Image (spheres, rainbow, N blue to C red):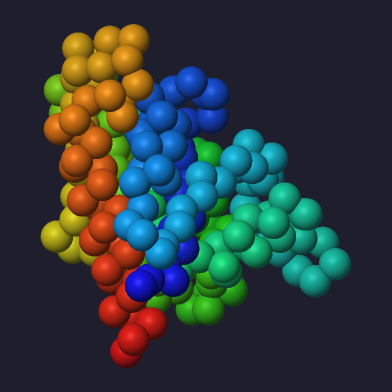
Amino acid sequence: MSDAHVLVLVGSLRANSVNKQIADTAASLTPEGSSAVVYDGLADVPFYNEDIDVDGKVPSSALELRAAAEKATAFLLVTPEYNGTIPAVLKNAIDWLSRPYGAGAVSKKPVAVISASPSGNGAKWAHDDARKAVGIAGGKVLEDVELTIGGTIDKFGTAHPRENAEVSAEIGAVVAELVKASDELVAA
């Protein structure tokens, strides 16, 4: 039995975005004994600024993000692609979680990325940039675990991604690998 707890961070703030739906699907597909939660407060976290990242000045929204991340044993980043890269809200979350340098809440914890977009490339650039940023921030990016979902409008239409058996299976496989990596890290 696993005690893995996956924190899911979504790069889209839109309530009904496909990426949010993918995140919700991922959270519902955790293996028995593990859990996942989609973090819902990224819109409230101010842009990272070292001047406010000091005792007594850290905004409560950033403290809440860090507290949720500290409880996590693994992270799943779900991102669309904005102008060829990751959305600012996701990059900002990574920046807050990277501090203090070398000991941030994401440090040494397993991380996977899922990207999705209406384009055929499946937000591949954002996917790669998210993996790069979180890796530099100290996360242990799972090298062989990648999922890009392209053509979301044609693939899903008005349906929820969980209704697509192939995509649900791919999302479930990513979550299972994250849980496995988390369990291996705890056992080590």
> Toward the viewer: 125 or 188?
188
Place of residue 114 in the rendered image (x, y in percent of width and height, measured from the top left): 29, 43
Q: Residue at x 27, y 68 (%)?
A: 180
Q: Where is residue 104 drawn, in percent x and y?
A: 54, 72
In which quadrant will I find the C terminus?
A: bottom left
Q: Nearer the viewer, residue 36 or 46?
A: 36
Q: Is residue 90 above or below residue 133?
A: above
Q: State whether residue 125 appears in this view.
A: no
> To which quarter of the image does residue 87 belong?
top left
- 25 vs 102, left or right, is left
Compared to residue 38, the image places residue 80 above or below, namely above
Q: Is residue 87 left or right of residue 170?
A: right
The answer to whether residue 149 shows anywhere in this view is yes
Of residues 139 and 48, the one nearer the viewer is: 139
Residue 92 point in image, percent of width and height: 54, 48
Residue occupying the point 19% across, 18% down: 155
Q: How many marks?
A: 0
Judge whether 64 appears above or below 127 on screen. Answer: below
Residue most toward the right?
A: 56
Q: Residue at x 30, y 49 (%)?
A: 113
Residue drawn at the location 40% of the way across and 43% of the way down: 28
Quadrant of the rendered structure where residue 142 is? bottom left
Q: Where residue 138 sits: x, y (%)?
A: 40, 71
- Seen as rendered, the residue at the extreme bottom is 188
Position of the N terminus, as image quadrant, is bottom left
